[in-house]
Image: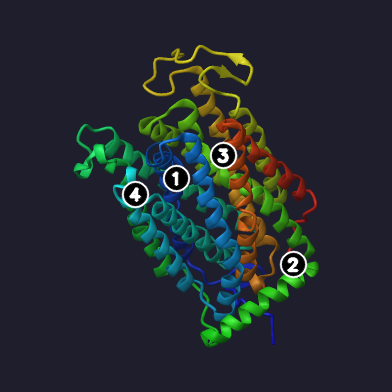
């Protein structure tokens, strides 16, 4: 049975041909539509609401949130490589993106019915919806990222990837500001939302879904896709399954790509947890509520967008591998520093009188809070630059003829042990009874992944 699936990329000699500026811009617009889900639901609003209100216990809530992400990550790890190879065999990626985008939108919309005390959905059902939305989000990354090398010239891959992450964060910022100004702050929230039943928090699920629906349309209309191969779907499934098994067995022939996938498998777990638990950690340690969390997001997201933009430019100038190691080192350094702040101390060892205002500000008035937010700004720059450079690295070293399949393996590397970091966070949090120790477990994954990148070369596999 043949195992070499032709990608038929719209490129010649590594430079994209016949792709309009509108097509490239629409590829980026897809991230403009999708990424606010992660910010509103996973990090700043719904995640802390789940922890503090639905569960009602910050420590147990952090552990349960980690469990949900672990189950979703394991699911994507199992299916992503096979779906990517089946898509390579069949041709177009957009039908797959349409399915997983729809799954994410539907699950996100239904989070509206997640209420405390089982007044709406059960705790299990809420967790299942979050897991399904995460599956849709992560699976869409496989097919969307695999289209990158066919849309832009080789030497501009880093910049294109970075712009996608940068503008995705700008969109997240705009929607977060909208929620703060029109829903959280007014005495009468927009749409007549009832705070007593937590409608002002639950609304972010439907908002993220509708935002994605609107801004994903340009991608489906104008970004070029590959033509169909003419194979029946059942043949594409057989060929895709066989191709994945062949690729896994022959990874010895793609040793450089294999080394990269292993390194990313380890550090990506840490990145996801660092990003996901930032708001949950701050809510538990500093007792922040919705206003503080929204303000925290508004402050940090512009730095995240800056990280994506600068990360892509730096990667194209000094090399993707060097840029990737630089940004990942920044995550580790500033991640360590961020754990040194609590209401009663700064930089781990220096005591501070809890609750004492350092500046007359409506939020983040104490010195530990100010220093924590400042440190998180640098974490945000480094994390998003690492995401952008990671995608660019895969687009630079994977074989062109099997790009979607290898992006499936890329998703596998990001999710194969995605249960490991959440389990480590959950275990460390439960055993220590401390959110700080739970977050510290993340740094181990980042450090090991950084060491692994030392053995990777920046060269394309054939």
In the visual, does 300 lie left or right of 393? left
Q: Which mark is residue 114?
A: 4
Residue in the foreground of this view, choosing between 221 and 402? 402
Q: CA distance from mark 1 to mark 4?
A: 18 Å
Q: CA distance from mark 3 to mark 2?
A: 30 Å
Tell me the quarter of the image containing the N terminus: bottom right
Q: Earlier in the sequence, mark 1 or mark 4?
A: 1
Q: CA distance from mark 4 to mark 2?
A: 46 Å
Q: Mark 1 or mark 3: which is in front?
A: 1
Q: Are marks 4 and 3 in contact (CB under 8 Å)?
A: no
Q: Mark 1 or mark 2: which is in front?
A: 1
Q: Secondary structure at mark 2?
A: loop
Residue 382 position, x and y percent, is: 60, 40
Tell me the quarter of the image containing the C terminus: bottom right
On the image, numbered disc 1 is attached to which residue? Answer: 39
In the visual, does 119 lie left or right of 329? left
On the image, numbered disc 3 is attached to which residue? Answer: 381
Q: CA distance from mark 1 to mark 2?
A: 35 Å
Q: Earlier in the sequence, mark 4 or mark 3?
A: 4
């Amino acid at each position: 049975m043949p195992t070499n699936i032709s990608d038929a990329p719209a490129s010649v000699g590594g430079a994209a041909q016949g792709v309009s500026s509108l097509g490239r811009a629409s590829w980026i617009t897809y991230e403009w539509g999708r990424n606010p889900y992660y910010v509103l639901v996973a990090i700043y609003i719904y995640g802390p609401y789940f922890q503090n209100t639905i569960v009602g216990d910050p420590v147990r809530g952090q552990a349960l949130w980690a469990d949900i992400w672990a189950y979703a990550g394991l699911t994507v790890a199992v299916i992503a490589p096979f779906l990517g190879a089946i898509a390579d065999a069949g041709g177009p990626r957009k039908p797959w993106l349409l399915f997983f985008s729809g799954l994410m939108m539907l699950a996100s919309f239904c989070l509206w019915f997640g209420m405390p005390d089982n007044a709406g959905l059960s705790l299990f059902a809420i967790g299942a919806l979050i897991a399904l939305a995460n599956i849709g989000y992560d699976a869409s990354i496989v097919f969307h990222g695999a289209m990158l090398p066919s849309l832009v010239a080789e030497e501009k891959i880093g910049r294109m990837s970075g712009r996608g992450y940068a503008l995705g964060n700008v969109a997240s910022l705009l929607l977060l500001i909208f929620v703060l100004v029109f829903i959280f702050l007014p005495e009468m929230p927009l749409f007549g939302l009832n705070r007593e039943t937590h409608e002002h928090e639950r609304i972010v699920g439907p908002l993220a879904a509708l935002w994605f629906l609107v801004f994903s349309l340009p991608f489906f209309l104008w970004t070029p896709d590959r033509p169909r191969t003419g194979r029946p779907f059942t043949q594409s499934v057989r060929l895709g399954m066989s191709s994945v098994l062949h690729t896994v067995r022959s990874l010895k022939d793609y040793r450089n790509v294999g080394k990269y996938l292993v390194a990313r498998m380890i550090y990506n777990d840490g990145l996801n947890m660092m990003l996901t638990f930032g708001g949950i950690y701050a809510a538990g340690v500093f007792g922040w509520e919705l206003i503080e969390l929204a303000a925290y997001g508004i402050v940090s997201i512009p730095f995240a967008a800056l990280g994506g933009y600068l990360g892509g430019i730096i990667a194209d100038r000094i090399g993707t591998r060097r840029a990737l190691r630089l940004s990942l080192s920044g995550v580790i350094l500033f991640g360590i520093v961020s754990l040194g702040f609590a209401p009663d101390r700064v930089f781990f060892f220096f005591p501070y009188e809890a609750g004492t205002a350092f500046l007359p500000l409506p939020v983040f008035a104490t010195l530990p809070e100010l220093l924590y937010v400042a440190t998180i700004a640098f974490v945000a720059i480094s994390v998003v630059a690492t995401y952008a450079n990671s995608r660019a690295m895969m687009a630079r070293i994977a074989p062109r003829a099997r790009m979607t399949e290898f992006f499936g393996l890329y998703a596998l590397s990001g999710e194969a042990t995605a249960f490991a970091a959440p389990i480590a966070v959950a275990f460390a949090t439960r055993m220590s009874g401390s959110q700080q120790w739970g977050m510290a477990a993340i740094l181990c994954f980042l450090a090991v992944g950084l060491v692994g990148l030392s053995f990777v070369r920046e060269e394309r596999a054939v």
